[in-house]
Image: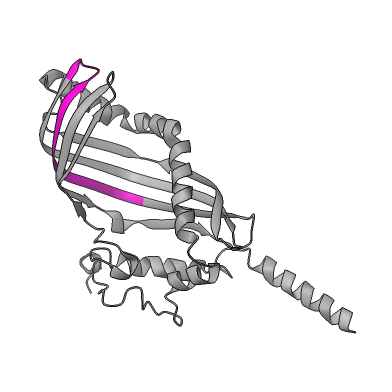
Amino acid sequence: MQRAQLTSRALLAIAILYACLSPAVCVYEAKILSFLEEFRMRMCHPIPNLGLPALDPLQFGPVATELNNKYLVDFTGSIDNFQLHGLSDFDVPELSLTPVPRLKNTINVTLPLTHFESLYTAKGSLAYILNLAGDGNAETSIKNFSILISFRLRSVSPLAIYSLEIELGLGELWINFDNLVEEERINDFFHALVNELGVELLGDVWDYEQGTVVSKAQAAVNKFLGQFTLSEIIQIITGGGSEGESAPIFEGVEPDCKLEASPTN
């Protein structure tokens, strides 16, 4: 009799497990989407409990940088008053998460339109042939950006992800950097080239750098996840309270960032 009861419980546990494999049933997709919606409504404010500054617009500067690889680029530059708009317009058309080891988790995030504006300087040369004379306004807009992330989860301690894959998609790119290249005709040609072929060029760059970026991203994520258990991560995302509660993560941060976009009655 005892063996039969144990068998029944085991079969019930297996049945529950397989029921959890369908999207938005047992793996908190609905709560995560609710969390992201609350997050979106607060992205114009700093969120202290997440250690985040205001993200829409994202602002920083001044920042200075330099690069000299002797043969290709000899460059010094700066950015000031940088503002990136549109991050809070994100959508999540696909979200499939499971705590079951070895099963794939998938997240797809899309941004219909993002654009940044900044003051910049860029001095130096490209291959010692083209002189950079940048000094003025810089603007870039990106349409229909998407990022598809898939990974598998190791739920035993330390919590970690593996087999991370990242796919990027880009619909349209437009740039305008005042006086980037010293020769005006070449400057116009450069902008026309990037605005015509920028999507393909960035795709080639991503294909070349993807392995390095994915490896560093996975290491950074695992360094963060290693501080928590799976249940603690779920509590962080869902706010640790009852259904519909957002505290304590968003405590003191008003959800008023998208009110101007709401339809009026």
Is residue 250 visible to the viewer in this orientation of the structure? Answer: yes
Image spot of residue 218 (x, y percent): 48, 49
User: In the rendered image of this protein, does residue 25 appear above or below residue 103?
Assistant: below
Image spot of residue 75 (x, y percent): 20, 28
Image spot of residue 189 (x, y percent): 20, 21
In this rendering, position of residue 181 left or right of residue 228: left
Frontmost residue, 264 versus 75? 75
Residue furthest right in the image: 1
Queried whether the magenta region covers residue 124, the answer comes back as yes
Q: State the extent of the magenta-drawn residues as a range.
A: 111-130
> How many numbered marks are there?
0
Residue furthest top in the image: 129
User: In the rendered image of this protein, does residue 237 appear above or below residue 105?
Assistant: below
User: Residue at left 63%, top 63%?
Assistant: 21
User: Residue at left 21%, top 46%?
Assistant: 116
Frontmost residue, 35 versus 213? 213
Image spot of residue 89 (x, y percent): 31, 57
In this rendering, position of residue 18 left or right of residue 215: right
Is residue 148 visible to the viewer in this orientation of the structure? Answer: no
